[in-house]
Amino acid sequence: MKDGGRLAAAIEVLTEVETRHRPVQLALKDWGSAHRFAGSGDRTVIGNLVFDALRNKASLGARMNDGSARAVVLATYCLGWGKGLQALSDVLEQDHHAPAALSPDEIACLSQEPDSTPSPFEQADIPEWLWPHFETVFGESAIEEGQALATRAPVDMRTNTLKSDRDKVLKRLAHTGAKATPLSPVGARIEAKPDLGRMPHVQAEEGYRKGWFELQDEASQLAAHLAQAKPGEQVLDFCAGGGGKTLALAASMQNKGQLYAYDADRLRLAPIHERLQRASVRNIQVKDPATSSLDDLVDQMDLVFIDAPCTGTGVWRRRPDSKWKLAEKALQDRIEDQRRVLESASRYVKPGGRLAYATCSVLREENQAQADWFLEQNPSFQSVSALDIWKTTLPDARLPKYVSDRGDILLTPGSTQTDGFFIALFQRVQ
Ligand SMILES: C[S@@+](CC[C@H](N)C(=O)[O-])C[C@H]1O[C@@H](n2cnc3c(N)ncnc32)[C@H](O)[C@@H]1O
């Protein structure tokens, strides 16, 4: 395929996502199945166009005076990827599979800066209703943080220290350009490639199959690290889902002590078994909500980890379609879910034990406000500074920018080049 056909395909897929509310990965897959002649290189470019158009939909829509799929895909190619107006015009005119040639209005928008400054939410590439929420959290950096959430994410991996070490993983992945992550002591990173670039499929690597590393963003690695699960402890991962944090906690525990993985949704737990096996985790009991109870764990845990259900505003780099689907009602629902989870999970912490609360959201309502609420409701818990643990256990890592008075930490793409992630720690004092 030439770029003209790829642009047409990207517009078709994006239209499908927006008008029929199809998840972007599914829409891309369906397009691929219906167009078998397209090679893997074509699919990569089409996918990159669709994802980048979604990431920058508000700013490109403002620039084009038109938020349609055609307008934002053409603007992605011309402006976002820096191909320029001439190259875009040539591509549209020389390929009969290409979308229609540029209109005079489109040429005008693509060739000159707009007369008026776009609104802050458009510059930040976030939904309008979320702008005040971003301002509350980030103040003067709100546009910058929104823009960082609209960039491509790297591929981050966590070394499974039960089976390997970071040097060995980096050596094995040398051909991919993987480098040590700057903050997590067990992380490896392949930087995002620009424009047409394709990211390597690291799950096909021998090291992955052997369980030497897991795919995991550096922020998630740091959240698990800050919880400080220790060998010999009794630890409950209360929202274990597919087991990303469970595996990191197990590695910290060096397979010693007892780790329990629970999730209210048994379907979400399903992938955990295969992952635990590949990673050689042995000190674990998976608690299926349909068949097992946690009653005997009440007041028994040294550490309970809550990777709470949330709006996912911190992972928009990876799921840009979710950015435009998020509704205020969903935020309210997640706030209620989080309170329910905090109330239930905290019952398992023993006197003197710890509770870790994490979300992949950047919104105050889901983060600091929930930590405030929990402390108000539960006088038997007090706050523990995650920042102090960062300082003592990550002495070489730059300090995070967004830290609350209590020492709760918010990581962001703009400040730590990670996903957006919040972590607060508590200790049960009585
Ligand atoms: C952010 S996801 C967890 C991701 C997972 N920890 C990982 O690292 O792959 C949040 C999880 O919380 C679970 N959840 C939601 N409400 C819950 C509840 N009341 N009790 C336990 N788990 C709950 C959801 O099913 C979902 O799997």
Image (cartoon, rainbow, N blue to C red):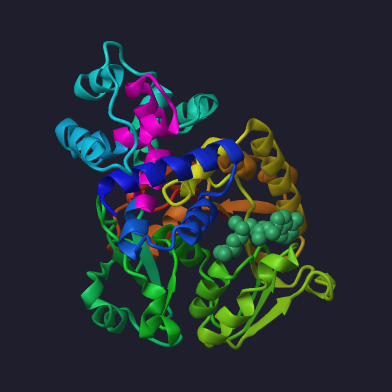
Residue 380 coordinates in the image, percent (x, y):
72, 53
Residue at 55% in and 67% down? 245
- Considering every residue shown, the one lying at the far front of the view is 96
Q: Is residue 90 left or right of residue 146?
A: left
Image quarter in which the C terminus is found: bottom right
Task: Say above or below: 298 vs 372.
Answer: below
Q: Is residue 265 left or right of residue 226?
A: right
Viewer-closest of 225 and 202: 202
Total numbered labels: 0
In this view of the protein, can residue 402 be seen by the observer?
A: yes
Residue 96 coordinates in the image, percent (x, y):
29, 42
Residue 100 coordinates in the image, percent (x, y):
33, 32
- Considering every residue shown, the one lying at the far top of the view is 115
| Magenta: main secondary structure | helix
Task: Say above or below: 403 vs 280.
Answer: above
- Considering every residue shown, the one lying at the far left of the view is 86
Residue at 32% in and 53% down? 45
Q: Is residue 349 left or right of residue 173?
A: right
To which quarter of the image does residue 61 belong? top left
Viewer-closest of 48 and 16: 16
Task: Say above or below: 68 vs 176.
Answer: above
To which quarter of the image does residue 204 belong? bottom left
Q: Is residue 342 left or right of residue 178?
A: right
In this picture, which residue range is highlighted in magenta?
46-75
Residue 233 coordinates in the image, percent (x, y):
61, 78
Residue at 49% in and 77% down? 252
Viewer-closest of 16 and 430: 16
Residue 60 is one of the magenta-drawn residues:
yes
To which quarter of the image does residue 326 belong? top right
Residue 281 is one of the magenta-drawn residues:
no
Tell which quarter ligand 1 is in.
bottom right
In this view of the protein, can residue 161 be seen by the observer?
A: no
